[in-house]
Image (cartoon, rainbow, N blue to C red):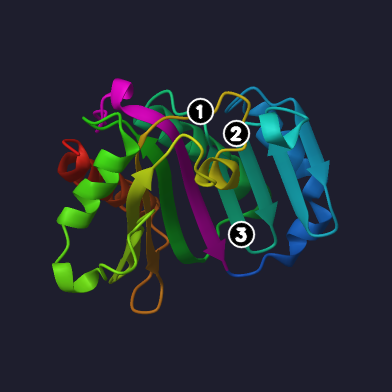
Amino acid sequence: MQENIETKNIGNRKFIIELRFDPKVSMLDKKGLLAEQIGNCKAFNINHWEIGQGEVSIRDNEDKEKATNIVVVTYNRLSFISFKINSIEGFYSTFKKIYEEVILVLGELNIRRIGCRIIGTYMVKSKDYNSVLNNFKSSFPAKFLLEQYPAKDFLFNLVYENGMYQIGPLNEEDGFYDREFKISDCKKHVGVVIDTDNYLTNETQNINSKSLIKDVYTLSLSVEKDLYSNLAEF
């Protein structure tokens, strides 16, 4: 799977794949085994795990704010979150390993929803926040903007069938960094934000095929790339 955006153009990036499935109540008795199996598969460098009343949480750092890979399994959900994207193929390969271990412990899952969200900050042509903001403003019809209320920031949100995306300008002091990238090596810069979330549900078709997970992942990557291509010259 070819990299969709050059690394030099990416400030920060977070990938999330989440599967929701029919409840597996047996998970409540197998939490320790889940933690063990996921740890043994060495999908990433696991340094910490926690077992709660209804969930298992596994990550690569005891300090949550320093963790860059996080797995959460409940009786009806599996989530893998990563801030450390060495390659888009590598991320998916890691998720696949984790998913296979969950199935080994819980048995086959009847998937209700497959979701993939990509959130990132990206470098653009301009290094000046006001220039980036003005480029956003000039891309929209004048009737959308009221002159008596000069824009200090901008966020465009669009919802489509089975997904959404948000884009906006980004300043070095933007609160977005604290909300989405509370990690020690967060890179703060002027640029743009892209947030896309795409999903598939079982309302009209069976979605248990593992290939559909990759399809949703690939779709999110495609949306991210298309948006960045349109914003790169800002």
Q: Position of residue 44 (x, y in %)?
A: 59, 25
Which residues are the magenta region? 1-21
Q: Residues within 10 Å of mark 1 (few under 14, many from 20)?
A: some
Outermost residue toward the bottom? 204
Q: Residues within 10 Å of mark 3 (few under 14, many from 20)?
A: some
Outermost residue toward the front? 148
Residue occupying image coordinates x 55% and y 45%: 180
Q: Earlier in the sequence, mark 1 or mark 2?
A: 2
Callout 2 secondary element: strand
Residue occupying image coordinates x 50% and y 39%: 95
User: Disc 3 designates what residue?
Assistant: 77
Q: Is residue 104 visible?
A: no
Q: Is residue 158 visible?
A: yes
User: Disc 2 designates what residue?
Assistant: 69
The Cα atoms of the two marked residues, 2 and 3, are separated by: 17 Å
Q: Position of residue 29 (x, y in %)?
A: 83, 56
- Residue 16 painted magenta: yes
Q: Marks 2 and 3: which is nearer the front?
A: 2
Q: Quadrant of the image for the C terminus?
A: top left
Q: Earlier in the sequence, mark 1 or mark 3?
A: 3
Q: Is residue 13 above or below residue 47?
A: below
Q: Is residue 76 above or below residue 101?
A: below
Callout 3 secondary element: strand
Q: Position of residue 68 (x, y in %)?
A: 60, 31
Residue occupying image coordinates x 42% and y 39%: 171
Q: Quadrant of the image for the N terminus?
A: top left
Residue 85 found in image quarter: top left
Identified by mark 1, the residue type is Lys
The Cα atoms of the two marked residues, 1 and 3, are separated by: 22 Å
Residue 145 found in image quarter: bottom left
Callout 1 secondary element: loop
- Asked if the residue under mark 2 is in contact with the one under mark 1, i.e. CB atoms within 8 Å, the reply is yes
